[in-house]
Amino acid sequence: MEADKTQRMRLAARTLPAVCILLSTWLLMWLALGLPTLCALAYPCPAPDVRVAPTLLFGGLMLVPAAALVITARGDDWGWVRTLSYIVIVGLAVVGLGVVLFSGGFTIPLTY
């Protein structure tokens, strides 16, 4: 009985970081949808929903490494899969947030 409880705690400790990365990235992407866009003078403004497609794409792609992390949480011999999955999920989170932020014309104003 005690071993079952420690096994569940170990599984929760192994899956919690992946779930936190996934949910926090989804929250940041959802918040990024409401940021205003800046339009260049030479080009027309993008549509208001231009950021939805990258959000859905990268949010969906992040489910694959998160699922791999949850599935391999029980076994100790899957260390290389877990390492690769963490690299992929963090990479998708960073690239996805960048794509979502800058796809709608969001720019950082450079004033001197």
Image: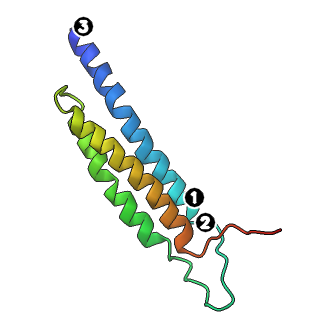
User: Horizontal placement of 77 versus 41: left or right?
Assistant: left
Q: Amino acid at mark 1?
A: Leu
Q: Quadrant of the N terminus?
A: top left
- The amino acid type of the residue labelled 3 equals Glu
Residue located beneath label 1 in the image: 31
Under tag 1, what secondary structure?
helix
Image spot of residue 87 (x, y percent) = 35, 45
Q: Is residue 16 above or below residue 87?
A: above
Q: Hey, which quadrant is residue 74 in on the image? A: top left
Residue 93 left/right relative to 70: right
| Residue drawn at point x = 44 percent, y = 60 percent | 96
The residue beneath circle 3 is 2
| Amino acid at circle 2 | Gly
Q: Tell me: residue 104, above or below residue 81.
A: below
Sequence order check, earlier mark of 3 and 2: 3
Q: Is mark 3 in CB contact (under 8 Å) with mark 2?
A: no
Q: Is residue 16 above or below residue 68?
A: above
CA gap, disc 2 and disc 1: 6 Å
Q: Earlier in the sequence, mark 1 or mark 3?
A: 3
Q: CA distance from mark 1 to mark 3?
A: 42 Å
Give me the C-alpha separation between circle 3 and circle 2.
48 Å
| Helix, strand or loop at mark 2 | loop
Quarter of the C terminus within the rendering = bottom right
For the point 27% across and 37% down, the residue is 82
Q: Residues within 10 Å of mark 3 (few under 14, many from 20)?
A: few
Look at the numbered discs 2 and 1 and tell me whether their residues touch, using CB distance below 8 Å: yes
